[in-house]
Amino acid sequence: MTQLKFDARVSASAQEALEPHVRPMYDQPGSRRMAIVEFAHIERMEPAPGTEKEPSVKVRIVGLELPNRDQEGAVREAQRFLHLQRTARGTLDDDGQLELSESTLRLTGAMLAYLETARLRAGLAHWREYAQRIVRGPDLTVTEVRHEMQALAEGLTAVLDTARDHGDDDT
């Protein structure tokens, strides 16, 4: 697996953004700061074939901004949302409805937009894997392909049919 390595140097603008936080971090051991970070590829290491070294890519922080106390909540919320979107998982029940995993439900904090995002992400991941199995599987007849595409279309429709989840039959 390719390793990610951070260069110890940061851009001048990133260093400037960090300056006001250096002394407070020193004075408060164990303290933390939220940040929005941009890093850029600066170097790659590709070992020769047959060696036991892992390939690596080195990046440098080129952009960095730290929110003030009033902004920190919004940045933390964005981080939580991005984490939820990346990690959302679920399974299909016997009726084909998506049930989010317990860990995904815990991350939503009962926030409806997060729940819907997690539900859609987990559902799309399931049907993407289904489509990949069709593509990687044995050669299918036209009839079999139509059958598989129908199952895929019905599954995606179920994922998108949020009104059904709420008992609204008007859609």
Image: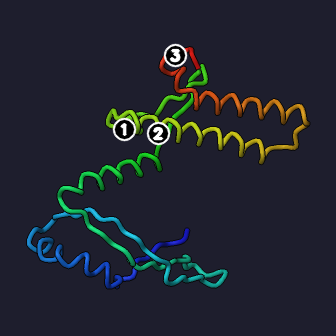
Image coords of residue 4 (percent x, y) = 47, 73
In the picture, which quadrant includes the N terminus? bottom right
Horizontal side of 140 relative to 17 (left or right) equals: right
Q: At 49% from the left edge and 40% from the top edge, which residue is drawn?
A: 89
Between marks 3 and 2 in the image, the one whose residue lies nearer the viewer:
3
Q: At 64% from the left edge and 33% from the top edge, which residue is drawn?
A: 156
**136 to 113, vertically: above or below:** below
Residue 67: quarter of image:
bottom left
Q: Disc number at residue 134?
A: none
Amino acid type of the residue tagged 3 in the rendering: Asp
Residue receiving disc 2: 118
Residue situated in front as seen by the camera: 51 or 126: 126
Image coords of residue 28 (percent x, y) = 10, 68
Outermost residue on the left side: it is 27
Q: At 40% from the left edge and 39% from the top edge, which residue is drawn?
A: 114
Amino acid type of the residue tagged 2 in the rendering: Ala
**Is there CB contact under 8 Å for labels 1 and 2?**
yes
Image coords of residue 137 (percent x, y) = 79, 44
Outermost residue on the front side: it is 170
Residue receiving disc 3: 168
| Disc with the residue nearer the chain's start (3 vs 2) | 2
Residue receiving disc 1: 108
Q: At 52% from the left edge and 26% from the top edge, which residue is drawn?
A: 162
| Disc with the residue nearer the chain's start (1 vs 2) | 1
**How dense is the environment of label 2, judged by Cα within 10 Å: few (below 14), some, or many (20 and up)?**
many
**How dense is the environment of label 1, judged by Cα within 10 Å: few (below 14), some, or many (20 and up)?**
some
Question: Mark 2: which secondary structure?
Answer: helix
Horizontal side of 28 relative to 63 (left or right) equals: left
Tell me the distance, in whole angstroms, between the alpha carbons under discs 3 and 2. 21 Å
| Disc with the residue nearer the chain's start (3 vs 1) | 1
Question: Mark 1: which secondary structure?
Answer: helix
Residue 108: quarter of image:
top left
